[in-house]
Amino acid sequence: MKKFCCLLLCLLCALPAVALGDAVELVVSVKPHAIHYAVYLPEYEFVYVGYDTQNDNAKEVLYSNNGAFEGICHLPGTMDESRVGINFYTLTGRLICRTTVNAAADPEVKGPAAGLSAEKAANKAQNVELLPVNGGIRYYFRLPGRDSVVLKCKSPQEWHKITLYAGPDYVYQGQVDMPCTYADDVVTVTATTGGGVEVLSESVNAYYSAPAAPAYASTSRLSGVTVCVDPGHQRTTQVETVPLMPNGEQTTTTKVGMAKGVETKRRESQLTLEIGMKLRNALMAEGASVAVTRDQQDTFVGMLERAEIPNSIDADFVLRLHCNSRSGNDQVQGIEVYCPLGSSYAQAVADRTDYKLMGETMLEAMQQFTGQERGVCTLNNTYVGNNWSLMPSFLIEMGYMTNMEEDLILSHPVYQERLVQGMVEGVVRLARLRGLIE
């Protein structure tokens, strides 16, 4: 709180406070291509912020443990004193407060490079290179005879429209910062001339790099315990038909598709991968041995393979990470844990009562750490990975992506860490129940 008050004081010196109704005060500091804001909203832990000008538009989720929120409106395309609308919402989409301020003009606008040769105007960009980097997209292309273009970079969370001027030999190169774009999301990059000719249109996935595994365990709570983490789905689904369970003749065929964020538009497969890699590291930090079924979006793992991997390493537990959806009902939310029921493999692990106890143990730990009160543990025969597992297996639906609030919070690092810590604590409690640790 002390740090926030110092920030408010500094910003007050930069620009008078902007009053928002009777109860909220927002303080802003304006610089070319950026507006730094700070606001105190003590009733909220997470808020959803959106801002827009004619050339820049973005939205992001902010977290604060004391109601003191701050952030930056990045305005790479805003060159003059355009009006900027800044809106603060709850995660359910209800407006909390709003304001409008003037952006600062850029005093260093540059034109085309000197000495450009006279060349016939091209209608298609040449030697195009688009590279996702941490926080943005790097671009390179050549466009003979064109002194300037309008470059537009668009993701589900933000878009920026920037006027570019040709460098030597009609080369255009640079980077567009896209700090509000989620990892692996599709970014569409287009370029048009002043006359409206589209000379470039390509897509690239935003940068994602899995966190490196820890070098050593910081504790030994789970020493001697082996866990398999199974991030559900993958970028591209392959249809396959496999036996549903080892003691039956019924088969099941892949259902193509996965949950998708109602607001973020994110894929379930990327969310489960992000959280799965964090879970791997957190379990390793507790002394566990950990295997994962996949560590990339483009790795395909079949339904039976998702059981064979933990079976092959004699894992003590397997956690299958998923995100839920409910067609036609955007109010449903909560954590759901699914355990196997009728499989001969499952029955050899535990009877129905004990499996129910284990599933509820995991659920209660996750609810404790996330604060999510809604949740249920269910035993069924639906999931191949559960049915074929030789150890306690839990398919965990971490939240509903068809619910705006859960969709937004599932992508925030703070809430992801709470999910991870809840699952780690669940494994610790399960290991004690199974007599693997004291």
Image (cartoon, rainbow, N blue to C red):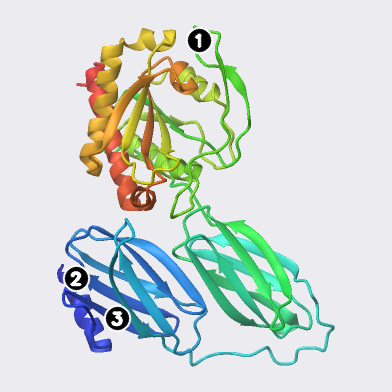
Q: Residue furthest front?
A: 328
Check disc 1: other Cα within 10 Å, few if <14, some if 14-19, many if 20+.
Answer: some
Circle 3: element type: strand
Label 1 or label 3, whichever comes before in sequence order: 3
Where is mark 2, residue-wise?
Answer: 3
Where is mark 1, residue-wise?
Answer: 246
Percent of width and height locating residue 402:
41, 46
Q: Nearer the viewer, mark 3 or mark 2?
A: 3
On screen, residue 312 above or below 347:
below
Label 2 or label 1, whichever comes before in sequence order: 2
**With 128 as the anchor, is 356 left or right in this view?**
left
On screen, residue 58 above or below 15:
above
Label 3 or label 2, whichever comes before in sequence order: 2
C-alpha separation, residue under disc 1 versus residue under disc 3: 63 Å
Q: Which residue sits at x=31%, y=9%?
A: 351
Q: Amino acid at mark 2?
A: Lys
C-alpha separation, residue under disc 2 versus residue under disc 1: 59 Å
Quadrant assignment, res 174: bottom right
Q: Which residue sits at x=44%, y=51%?
A: 262
In-front residue for pair 115/327: 327
Q: Amino acid at mark 3?
A: Val
